Image (cartoon, rainbow, N blue to C red):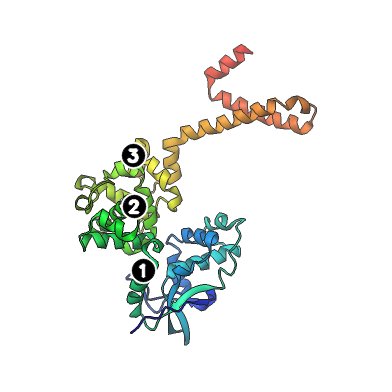
Amino acid sequence: MRVKTELQYAMLEDLYLDARNPRLGRHQKGASLSQKEILEIMGKWDLDELAISYLENGFWRHEALLVVKEELDGEQRFVVVAGNRRVAALIYLRQAISGEEIFKEWGPLVENKSIPEKLFEKIPYIQIHSRQEVESFQAFHHDVTGIKQWFPAQKSEYIAKLIDEQGMSYEDVRRMIGSDISRVRYHYISYRLFLQMDDVLEDFSAADAEFRFITMSLSIQTLGVQKYLDLDIFAEPDDAKTPVPKHRLGALANFARWLFGTQQHPPLLIGSRNADDFGRLLENSQAVQYLENNKHARFDVAWQLAYGNEEIIRLIGEAHNKIAISLSHIHHYKDSPEVQRAVEKLAINSKELLSQFPSIRAEFLEDN
């Protein structure tokens, strides 16, 4: 059957999440799931990155949803068979804008942000005749619109197939898709690492973890992750098929647990924004020891162990700079009751600070 490519638009409330979406998990997908239940499951995925993109760029036409018209709750409705993450992100985004309490990170995400015009009223979609047409349409869509518009996991998977199944080199792929060779290599190694975790880790679910793929991809660019996994990001395809060597498979299990979480424990990272800091943590032996030995490890505690000293120095340095600025003007405000109270509070805190450093306190008092 010929695939139709006519672009249409729908309001968010006219689009329905797919209860048969295989990414919901083998034990959860099914027609009996309500829209609320599907949304709650998807709420555990990384949707905030999509929401940020929508706030900055709107909903691009090349990201059009694929929908089929099916009976749902006794009526013919538009069911999204490709693009459920995008719809879920829009639903949560609209809830956050309306002030509903969903996830704590969504409040700051929408605070003081302007909403693109008709973001929730004009969502691009393409209606297909049946679910069987999805694969053929996606092949058409990718060939026409280009690989640069895919999500990271899709792009990396496609590159891996070109290399593994068609025997292409990094240079062959680079010429084919119009990218640079370092990006091709990066996508290939990212996807092979993802497959390696799926192969060797018993409690790893690729279907669940796919939605945090970008977090993993960003993290392996850091020196800390590369050293921790003994990962060679310059490896040629033959060597990169199993990116992490056997002697570091225990480290790989830790890495997967920290990034993707388990059924018992949430992931260490909330989203991709902490990927660089995560890499820095793995450069610090004290933080690594804490993370490896504590199943309930927290990112903020690990960071404090690793770099708390730097943070204290920064805070004290900022206080010093602000006091120095104040000293150049303070003589104009010596009679101000408000300034006097502020100086009194500063004196109390300074006295307490000095009590933590007896030698400095003794030297300071001796000089004065």
Q: Earlier in the sequence, mark 3 or mark 2?
A: 2
Asked which secondary structure carries label 1, the reply is helix
Q: Earlier in the sequence, mark 2 or mark 1?
A: 1
Q: Quadrant of the C terminus?
A: top right
Left or right: 237, with 78 as reference point: left
- Residue 142: which disc? 1
Q: Nearer the viewer, mark 1 or mark 3?
A: 1
- Give whichever of 121, 203 is nearer the camera: 121
Using a 10 Å C-alpha cutoff, classify the residue at mark 1 as few (fewer than 14 neighbours), some (14 to 19) or many (20 or more). some
Labels 1 & 3 near each other (Cβ < 8 A): no
Task: Name the kind of residue labelled 1 in the image.
Answer: His
On the image, numbered disc 2 is attached to which residue?
180
Residue 320 on image: x %, y %: 60, 28
Whether residue 76 is visible: yes
Residue 21 on image: x %, y %: 37, 73
Q: In the rendered view, would you say 136 is above or below 291?
A: below
Q: Nearer the viewer, mark 2 or mark 1?
A: 2
Q: Earlier in the sequence, mark 1 or mark 3?
A: 1
Q: In the rendered view, would you say 334 is above or below 250?
A: above
Quarter of the rendering containing residue 150 = bottom left
Asked which secondary structure carries label 3, the reply is helix
- Residue 289: which disc? 3
Using a 10 Å C-alpha cutoff, classify the residue at mark 3 as few (fewer than 14 neighbours), some (14 to 19) or many (20 or more). few
